[in-house]
Image: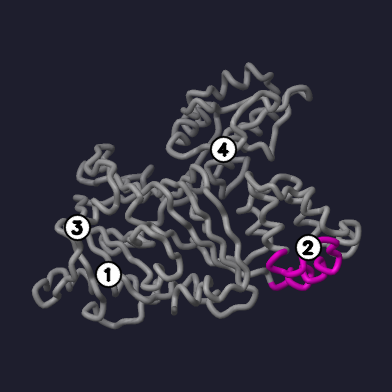
């Protein structure tokens, strides 16, 4: 998302694990090594760690909310009892890490949270969390892997249903990995001569096998797409924002519309200090974000009464340059209910160092009723990459070779 989830390394188990994978892998390892029964397992991993009424571990034969558990990867206890593990992990993952560490697992954060764990002991250092939550779309941009495309075309030759194009094939394949989809793998396979596919399309057969093993849609992306890293979030003014400094709330949860308030264009002639700070921002980020201006005076900067700032500009981040004019382009919108946690370690935190950067053409690209606030947050001219804790999605849409919804249209118009 794309996928800028906080990652973890667990000694002897794996690396680059997101929160859901971290919890699942440790429970799976514990079962393998300790061979507990159901009651013993629940005593070790109690519901209070997960923190909601949905619970942590459930018997797969009992009633439970299937959207909130990893039903695609059940685990078997003593060959008799099948259990499923909660997939709802955000802030509560901190409690799980404490528990797992006590059980002897060595866990190390690999991304931005590591900066929070290893903070300076100096009392003047502020540890800040800016949380933006609510319905926030995230756009994945990528392309079909070049080596797979000819095989996808061959797969279409073995179709016995309504799937006739690469775009239709990708949409159908993608839907098999979605929790709420009516098009499960058996439905997908019924539309093809699978015997011929297994005989003649080795790579596609491997993909089908991975889906049968329970990979989610993010795992599918890694298999079949080259992707632009991080994706693009669309933060709009109906989302909520809160700010904590050293675990004390200084901005209570409120709509971004209220936090931003009225914004006015900054007259640089009357604000030389802001001009200097904006030039520092430009100098630090011009190359990485592909901002095609030379001086801060060329940027349109807005500011509110608290001096929170916003820049709307035409720019192409360097991670996206290879995907603007390429063949077999894919855009996937994740309509998420999500918490975006921006972790900052700084001296003497001040909201007047917060800046939102927005794409000039996002309103035309995304077309949504709430006002677009930005896709990136900077603090003191540094881009802060958020930890994304997805509660659920309200829909995921894949489009193939749609020139009105591709990266070039967003970046260039």
Q: Is residue 66 magenta?
A: no
Helix, strand or loop at mark 1: helix
Q: Earlier in the sequence, mark 4 or mark 3?
A: 4
Q: Which residue is mark 4?
A: 87
Relative to 171, say whether 67 is above or below: above
Q: Is residue 299 left or right of residue 117?
A: left
Q: Residue at x 58, y 73 (%)?
A: 402
Name the front one of labels 2 and 3: 2
Q: Position of residue 95 (x, y in %)?
A: 45, 31
Residue picked out by circle 3:
352
* Magenta highlight range: 146-168
- Callout 2: 10 Å neighbours few (<14), some, many (20+)? few
Judged from this view, the residue extending furthest toward the top is 39
For marks 2 and 3 on the same chain, the one whose residue lies earlier in the sequence: 2
Q: Disc 2 on helix, strand or loop?
A: loop
Q: Which residue is mark 2?
A: 162
Residue 142: give x, y in percent of width and height.
Answer: 58, 68
Q: Residues within 10 Å of mark 1 (few under 14, many from 20)?
A: some
């Amino acid at each position: 998302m794309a996928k800028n989830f906080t990652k973890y390394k667990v000694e002897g188990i794996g690396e680059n694990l997101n929160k859901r994978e971290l919890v699942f892998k440790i429970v799976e390892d514990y079962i393998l090594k300790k061979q507990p029964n159901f009651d013993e397992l629940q005593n070790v991993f109690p519901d209070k760690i997960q923190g909601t009424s949905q619970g942590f571990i459930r018997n797969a034969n009992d009633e439970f909310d299937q959207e909130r558990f990893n039903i695609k990867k059940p685990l078997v206890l003593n060959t008799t009892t099948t259990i499923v593990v909660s997939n709802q992990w955000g802030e509560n993952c901190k409690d799980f890490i404490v528990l797992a560490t006590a059980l002897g697992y060595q866990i190390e954060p690999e991304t931005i949270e590591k900066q929070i764990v290893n903070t300076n002991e100096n009392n003047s250092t502020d540890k800040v969390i800016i949380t933006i939550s609510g319905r926030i779309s995230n756009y994945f941009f990528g392309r079909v892997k070049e080596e797979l495309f000819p095989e996808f075309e061959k797969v279409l030759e073995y179709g016995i249903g309504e799937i006739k194009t690469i775009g239709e094939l990708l949409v159908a394949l993608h839907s098999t990995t979605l929790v709420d989809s009516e098009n499960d793998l058996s439905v997908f396979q019924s539309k093809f001569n699978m015997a011929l596919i297994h005989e003649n399309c080795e790579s596609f057969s491997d993909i089908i096998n991975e889906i049968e093993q329970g990979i989610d849609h993010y795992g599918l992306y890694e298999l079949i797409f080259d992707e632009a890293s991080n994706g693009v979030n669309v933060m709009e003014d109906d989302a909520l924002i809160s700010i904590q400094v050293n675990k004390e709330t200084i901005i209570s949860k409120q709509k971004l519309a209220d936090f931003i308030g009225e914004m006015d264009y900054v007259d640089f002639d009357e604000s030389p200090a802001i001009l200097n700070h904006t030039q520092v921002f430009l100098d630090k980020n011009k190359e990485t974000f592909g901002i095609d201006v030379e001086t801060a005076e060329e940027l349109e900067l807005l500011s509110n009464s608290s001096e929170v700032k916003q820049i709307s500009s035409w720019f192409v981040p360097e991670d996206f340059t290879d995907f603007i004019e390429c063949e077999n382009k894919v855009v996937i919108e994740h309509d998420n209910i999500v918490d975006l946690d921006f972790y900052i370690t700084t001296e003497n935190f001040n909201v007047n160092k917060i800046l939102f950067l927005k794409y000039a053409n996002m309103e035309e690209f995304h077309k949504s009723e709430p006002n677009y606030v930005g896709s990136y947050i900077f603090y003191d001219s540094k881009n802060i990459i958020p930890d994304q804790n997805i509660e659920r999605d309200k829909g995921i849409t894949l489009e193939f070779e749609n020139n009105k919804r591709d990266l070039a249209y967003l970046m260039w118009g």
